[in-house]
Image (tube, grey):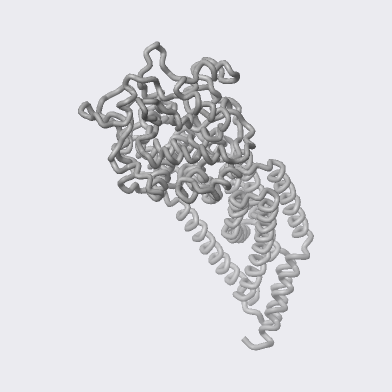
Amino acid sequence: MNNIQFKYLFKISKINFRYITKNYINLAFLSSFAIIFIIFSALYLKINSKESYDTVYLNLLAIENTVVYSFFGFFAGFLTIQMFFSKEAKNYQILEKQYGLKVYKSFLIRYLSLMSYVMMVTLLYILLEVMVIYLGLGNGDLAKIIALSKFNLLIFIPVIFGVTFILTILVKNEIGIMLTVIYILFVNIGPLFSAILKSESARKNDILIGEVNFNIKVGKDFFEASQRDELNLYDGKSHLFKLNKEDDKYYYNFLNDSELLTSFRNFSTSNEIKVDFRNVYYTYLSGQTLNREYVGDDVKYILGFNKEYINFFIELQDFLQSRSRYVSFSWEETPFFVKSFPQKLKKFDFNKLIDELKHSNLNTKYPNLIRFVEQYWDFILNYNLNELFSYKLFTEDGGVDSKGDEVWDNFVLTQNEEVNDFYNEYPEFLLLSQVINIGFINSFNLNISKYNISSSKNVDIAFEIDEYKKMLNKNKVNQFLNYFNYNSYLTGQFLSSNKATLALNQLKKTWTYSSVKNFVINEEMLNNQTDLGYDYDFINTSESIFSKSIKEKHTNILIYIYNVNFALMVVLSGLSFWIYVKNSKKDWN
């Protein structure tokens, strides 16, 4: 290309770009984007939550993406009409012919000018939103979730160009514009309609899948953390429960004729107190890890079967007692994972405490366990997602309300008075212990056979692995077939998959989301229990279900969606190029 040709090419490109930017309708769109940006930024800042999975944020994100994607789609469609089919565009074609510009170069100049401008506006919107969310809320994770989902516009916009161009060629301009608008609305509002129309049984099953995956993920991460910190929980040298009739070396052997190791309250309905599965587990899940029994001169902690594990909690107690007190809740307000009535969710903020733990001696000895707590405390304690993780006020079967001193006085067992005083003064210990003990239990056994699978006829089917696999396969097929819900997965990819499935399926009117990756479960994972046939089988703590590697299976829906969009972008843009060149040659000849 000689200098004269390059000069003309540059001049024509400049004319095209000026034509785009100085159009009044373009200015109207830019004003609309500014208004949309200001409104949603103000709403995000008004919520002012530090939680990345706050349901209000997720609802707002779904609405914002619908609005932003629709407006950017209209924007790209309008510019396509202006650049290729308006009267002004025809006049520019005549000018280009006079300059001796070839047809294919004419198309490429218009196409690249249009794409460069729209992409520039898109990236500016994303950049400003990242700055506002990050600087305004100080939440990098939330800024990533909200802003990164907009990057999918970089593929969506070329698709809209191709759809607009081809529809306008095939039918009259007005009808082509109308069909383009319908397509844009269906693609962007589709996820909202999918969420509204989703059956209750399908939603229940998606939540079930989310719970199963989350339980496995928690157990797996705890297993790996404890292994890296060399806690030796799974070496088989000691175990909590009696494995079989010949087993006399289990840790809870000393409990046979003693009181329970539970504080606050127990499930016993008779004067005879016995070791009951529910009472022991209740102690784990309520975070009462320092509960103990005196056997002669020995102190037997409820989880003292492993010295390294119980030492962590003793050192955590020392750490909490050595620091300044600033918690804003009492022990009555801590969650208890028992049969009780869900109450209004209380939000806990442990960011400062976790930061102090990361700079303490505990982090030197147990860095991976501290990292586990940092990773899971917020989601487990603060999200009213399902029966397993919901906030529970201290009531059980309509029994005594825990608010008040009466419950404390009546239900604290004498051998734990001292440690109960510590719980009363430092309730944050209970919460941290809950998070850790959930990981501990899930690393040995998954209590997921209690779930029921909902059929399309709203009939519950007992959980079986074969039925579960059928449900996963059905979900995968539905993911691929529902083209108008693809944007949900494009947005949801920036959320943690295990958390997203739980969180998003609580939002019945804005999101429908099936897990994009699932753990492969087997009978061994469900039945790692003792062989004694109790009504409440005790878990086998001599080995972990994660001692053998566990596989994770992806549905590959995201790869499929990107391939579909990329194929649409290439095919539609290529077809538009071919049509433009063919028609223009006829006009120019």
Residue 40 in the image: x percent, y percent?
70, 47
In this rendering, is residue 511 above or below 173? above
Of residues 12 and 517, the one nearer the viewer is 517
Residue 553, can we see it? Answer: no
In this rendering, is residue 369 above or below 119? above
How many dots with numbers?
Answer: 0
In this rendering, is residue 419 above or below 259? below
Residue 80 in the image: x percent, y percent?
66, 62
Instruction: Report the quarter where the N terminus lies.
Output: bottom right
Would you say 285 lies left or right of 58 here? left
The residue at the far front in this view is 297
Of residues 151 and 77, the one nearer the viewer is 151
* Point 41% across, 38% down: residue: 310
Would you say 494 lies left or right of 212 here? right
In this rendering, is residue 93 above or below 488? below
Residue 287, can we see it? Answer: yes
* Point 63% across, 77% down: residue: 589
Residue 53 in the image: x percent, y percent?
57, 42
Would you say 578 lies left or right of 17 here? left
- Quarter residue 191 falls in: top right
The residue at the far top in this view is 271
The residue at the far left in this view is 246
Would you say 472 lies left or right of 149 here? left
Of residues 452 and 363, the one nearer the viewer is 363
Residue 131 in the image: x percent, y percent?
68, 56
Of residues 74 and 198, the one nearer the viewer is 198
